[in-house]
Amino acid sequence: MDGTALAAWGTRVAAIAAPDERDLAPSITLAYAAGGRARRDLYRRAGHTPGGIGGGLVTVLPQLLDALAYATREVGDALGSAQFGNLVSATALLISLRRRSDPAAPRDPGTPPGAGTGPGEPTAAAVHAADLLADRLRSRGVPPPDADRLACELLAGLLNSPDRSGAAAFLDRLVAAEPPEPTVRTGGRLFGRRRRVRVQVRAADPPAAPGPATDGTDPDGPDGPGDTP
């Protein structure tokens, strides 16, 4: 996929979930796909509240692209599992996503959950992809209700696209130059998929030198350096 097609798909993503940012979408999408400093600069001005502090331009599209890059495999699985000719409703996807977090929530009788065979009924793969998208958006600072809504709108828009192969190629192109960060650090906390986090074991610290005794005994013994002749 060349840069023109990549920018066009970025504009589609903006039209689905961030329509006010369509004019900025080509440059933002190309910068994200480039990786490196160009991508990091997007995070510095990206945010969820339009306008931002100090009048700076704040956008949510970089967060949407980051969520797609983070869940590329799962979104691709959802694209493959969607029933052709069966449009997926963003509302139905949002309801299924909330049921996933609350198994006790009542379900409509008839269609098995995750079957993807009823009108607008999402597949289990689609609900899983939406869950990861929303989780990544939350980790980037998007409020939970908005993260769920944006994730479902974005995924439904891609699933309902007449060019699903093009959508899959777009996802691959987003991560071709540089994969997304496995975790997001916000306020001193790490967010991300636990299975992607590698725990690094720090080398053991050298034993501390013995300090002065506090109980009246000499840790160096009767002939140690702490004794006076």
Image (cartoon, rainbow, N blue to C red):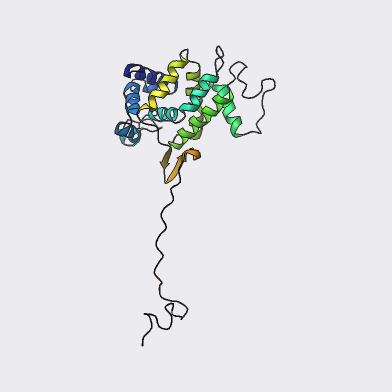
Where residue 60 appears, as percent x and y from the top left, is 40, 29
Where residue 81 appears, as percent x and y from the top left, is 55, 20
Quarter of the figure that contains the C terminus: bottom left
Image position of 82 with respect to 72: above or below: above
Q: Nearer the viewer, residue 56 or 28?
A: 28
Number of on-image labels: 0
Quarter of the figure that contains the N terminus: top left
Q: Is residue 205 visible?
A: yes
Q: Nearer the viewer, residue 99 or 225?
A: 225
Residue located farthest toward the front when viewing the structure as drawn = 223
Residue located farthest toward the left when viewing the structure as drawn = 37
Q: Quadrant of residue 140?
A: top left
**127 left or right of 43 in image:** right
Q: Is residue 18 visible?
A: no
Where residue 54 appears, as percent x and y from the top left, is 31, 36
Determine the residue positioned at 44% across, 23% down: 17
Determine the residue positioned at 47% across, 35% down: 138
Q: Quadrant of residue 110?
A: top right
Q: Nearer the viewer, residue 142 or 114?
A: 114
Residue located farthest toward the right when viewing the structure as drawn = 109
**145 left or right of 107 in image:** left
Where residue 38 appears, as percent x and y from the top left, is 30, 31
